[in-house]
């Protein structure tokens, strides 16, 4: 028989948290092991995909350029850089940590499930009912962010940095860890950024944020989004606009979610007042 969460001590909560973390780590390790075995597909197809000129994003930009009458100005004919490993354990280390990253991404829904199991006993029954789709929605948003980071942010960054030179005397030889680090940061950052609506939902539920606050500070959000776009993308205006548009849409969606959540809270307060 499960313990009543209200009667659990602090140490009991820590014990519960420990087992949720253990199960989450085991799920990540299981999927990481599968990714470790599928080395050729993970590296040749996924990791080094944005390095190839036939990557879907580059084809899309080329078609877009031709459609707007810009000729082949956005078409890519070569990637003038090589990737090398300059440490003894460099390739094995990259293989290991990339597998763990893949394991985390694939196991993300289960990790969120364990997180939800830990926090849900502390919620009221109606709160648990209203947040029933938390795991599904947060996972979908995370995967959309990962896809956005992989197909938009990563190729834009790699194309810009791979073609950037300060002198014809210098040839770009990127270290394997540096290349994977760029891809990892782009993918994970985008995945976590796309969790913004979920974060706004919970912050609104606890009363920290209101829709009026979000609407009133929209101009500051615009500056933050543009700054964030400048950080995670190359310093050219086209790339920043491409990344900024989905982030601004995400912010507007967050305002709508905050309004909806805030209205439900006010309705519940009014119903409770009328009952009394």
Image (cartoon, grey):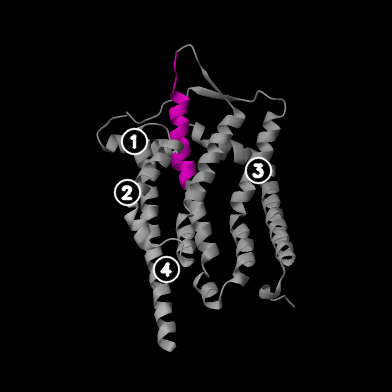
For label 1, count other residues whose C-alpha is less than 10 Å away and answer few (under 14), some (14-19) or many (20+): few
Say left or right for 66 vs 268: left
Residue ID at (42%, 83%): 273
2 vs 1, front mark: 2
**Residue 224's x, y, as percent?**
39, 44
Residue ID at (70%, 47%): 33
Circles 2 and 3, Cβ within 8 Å, touching? The answer is no
Quote the CA–CA distance across marks 4 and 2: 22 Å
Q: Which residues are magenta?
A: 148-167
Disc tally is: 4
SS for tag 2?
helix
Tell me if residue 158 is in the magenta stretch: yes
| Residue 238, image quadrant | top left
| Dot placed on the residue nearer the N-terminal end, 1 or 4 | 1
Residue under label 2, please give it.
Answer: 219
In the picture, residue 159 is in which quadrant? top left
As measured in the structure, the alpha-carbon distance from the residue carrying label 1 to the one carrying label 4 is: 35 Å
In front: 120, or 11? 11
Earlier in the chain: of badge 3 and badge 4, it is 3
The residue that label 1 is drawn on is 238
Q: Are marks 1 and 3 in contact (CB under 8 Å)?
A: no
Mark 3 and mark 4 in contact? Answer it, CB < 8 Å. Answer: no
Are the residues tagged 4 and 2 within 8 Å (C-beta)? Answer: no
Magenta stretch containing residue 32, yes or no? no
Between the C-alphas of marks 1 and 3, the distance is: 33 Å
Residue 48 seen:
no
Q: Which residue is mark 4?
A: 261
């Amino acid at each position: 028989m499960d313990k009543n969460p209200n009667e659990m001590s602090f140490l009991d909560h820590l014990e519960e948290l420990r087992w949720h973390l253990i199960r989450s780590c085991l799920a990540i390790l299981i999927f990481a092991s599968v990714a470790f075995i599928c080395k050729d597909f993970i590296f040749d197809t996924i990791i080094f995909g944005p390095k190839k000129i036939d990557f879907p994003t580059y084809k899309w930009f080329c078609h877009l350029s031709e459609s707007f009458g810009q000729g082949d100005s956005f078409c890519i004919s070569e990637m003038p850089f090589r990737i090398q490993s300059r440490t003894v354990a460099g390739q094995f280390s990259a293989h290991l940590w990339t597998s763990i990253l893949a394991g985390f991404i694939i196991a993300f829904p289960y990790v969120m499930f364990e997180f939800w199991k830990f926090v849900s006993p502390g919620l009221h029954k109606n709160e648990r009912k209203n947040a029933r789709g938390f795991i599904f929605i947060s996972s979908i948003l995370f995967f959309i962010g990962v896809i956005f980071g992989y197909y938009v942010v990563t190729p834009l960054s790699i194309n810009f940095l791979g073609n950037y030179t300060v002198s014809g005397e210098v040839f770009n030889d990127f270290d394997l860890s540096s290349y994977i680090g760029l891809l990892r940061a782009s993918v994970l950052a985008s995945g976590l950024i796309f969790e913004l609506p979920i974060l706004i939902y919970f912050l609104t539920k606890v009363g920290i944020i209101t829709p009026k606050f979000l609407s009133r500070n929209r101009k500051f959000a615009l500056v933050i989004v543009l700054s964030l776009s400048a950080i995670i993308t190359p310093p050219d205006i086209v790339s920043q606009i491409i990344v900024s548009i989905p982030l601004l849409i995400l912010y507007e969606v967050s305002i709508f979610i905050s309004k909806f959540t805030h209205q439900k809270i006010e309705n519940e307060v009014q119903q409770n007042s009328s009952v009394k």
